[in-house]
Image: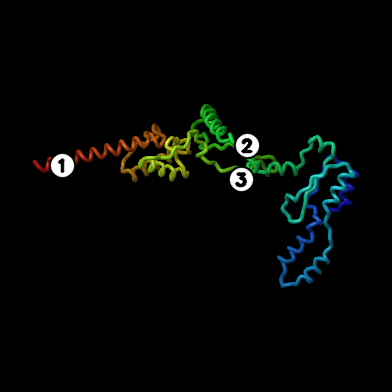
């Protein structure tokens, strides 16, 4: 594609908007060719030999300045950027009638692409974002719990400023942020303090696959379910040498309440053991 061919298209068809992709950029054409020669060279060559090879190659690129001049002459606004194809040294160009561009009536594919791909979180943040998300998540949970059965409720929630989209306008699942279940918890984080609380928090973290567990965090809000609950109870049995029924984890679903049950169970087992030892010693004296 040449400047003359582009001009002919604009002159004859007079389109409202039209674009070309992978145009060769004349300004970097030789540089790209030099890099390719150096990367594919089978034998070592000096600078003079490489220069001769480059000079023997025909220049077929377009100077961006020529496109800008053409757009002004033909009454178009030009949108120019590096090619979205990723090919080095290529550029994409979109011509839009100046009147439409001024009124922002036409959103070109290049503009859409740049808007989609820019992560605006890299340039600034909402200082109230954390508080907003903490307020929204409980409302979502309440709304969904009233309309969906328990097994269909999400285990984690993420607040996004906008959905990541593909070129076709569909949700880009690969670009979505990973679900951080800890961000779905509506309570403020309070670190474990007692030995029992720290032990339980470690067990929860291992089973749920999260790093931080606060004493007020609800086991099921963190993504837990009945199968994980049985794993937690098995590890509690191994670490604390006590047996808790499954119902206890449903009734005491946070570290603070569960630690009280565990401490009471440990104390009860210890007291029972002491009584048994006393009975055995008295029986021996008789």
Dot 2 or dot 1: first in sequence order is 2
Q: Give the distance between the C-alpha atoms of the residues marked 2 and 1, in whole angstroms.
A: 69 Å
Q: Give the distance between the C-alpha atoms of the residues marked 2 and 3, in whole angstroms.
A: 17 Å
Q: Quadrant of residue 32?
A: bottom right
Q: Tag 2: Cα neighbours inside 10 Å, few (<14), some, or many (≥20)? A: few
Asked if residue 165 lies left or right of residue 274, the reply is right
Q: Tag 1: Cα neighbours inside 10 Å, few (<14), some, or many (≥20)? A: few
Q: Position of residue 50 (x, y in %)?
A: 77, 69
* Residue bearing mark 3: 174
Viewer-proximal residue, 108 or 247?
108
Q: Quadrant of the C terminus?
A: top left
* Residue bearing mark 2: 161
* Residue bearing mark 1: 280
Up/down of 172 relative to 43, above or below: above
Asked if residue 240 lies left or right of residue 108, the reply is left
Rendered image coloring scheme: rainbow
Asked if residue 96 lies left or right of residue 112, the reply is right
Q: Give the distance between the C-alpha atoms of the residues marked 1 and 3, in whole angstroms.
A: 66 Å
Residue lying at 56% horizontally and 43% vertically, measured from the top left: 178
């Amino acid at each position: 594609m040449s400047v003359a061919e582009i001009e002919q298209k604009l002159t004859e068809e007079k389109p409202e908007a039209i674009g070309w992709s992978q145009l060769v950029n004349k300004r970097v054409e030789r540089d790209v060719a030099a890099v390719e020669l150096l990367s594919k060279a089978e034998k070592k060559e000096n600078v003079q030999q490489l220069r001769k090879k480059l000079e023997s190659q025909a220049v077929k690129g377009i100077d961006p300045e020529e496109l800008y001049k053409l757009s002004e002459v033909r009454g178009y606004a030009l949108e120019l950027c590096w090619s979205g194809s990723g090919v080095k040294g290529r550029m994409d160009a979109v011509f839009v009638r100046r009147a439409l561009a001024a009124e922002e009536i036409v959103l070109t594919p290049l503009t859409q692409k740049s808007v989609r791909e820019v992560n605006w979180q890299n340039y600034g943040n909402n200082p109230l974002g954390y508080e907003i998300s903490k307020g929204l998540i409980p409302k979502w949970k309440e709304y969904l719990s009233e309309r969906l059965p328990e097994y269909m409720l999400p285990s984690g929630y993420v607040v996004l400023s906008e959905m990541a989209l593909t070129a076709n306008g569909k949700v880009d699942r690969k670009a979505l942020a990973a679900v951080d279940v800890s961000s779905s918890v509506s309570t403020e984080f309070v670190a474990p303090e007692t030995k029992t609380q720290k032990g339980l928090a470690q067990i929860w973290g291992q089973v749920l696959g999260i790093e931080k567990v606060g004493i007020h965090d609800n086991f099921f809000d963190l993504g837990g379910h009945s199968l994980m609950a049985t794993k937690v109870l098995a590890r509690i049995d191994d670490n604390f040498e006590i047996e808790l029924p499954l119902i206890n984890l449903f009734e005491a679903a946070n570290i603070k309440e569960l630690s009280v049950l565990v401490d009471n169970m440990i104390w009860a087992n210890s007291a029972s053991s002491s009584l048994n030892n006393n009975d055995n010693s008295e029986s021996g004296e008789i």
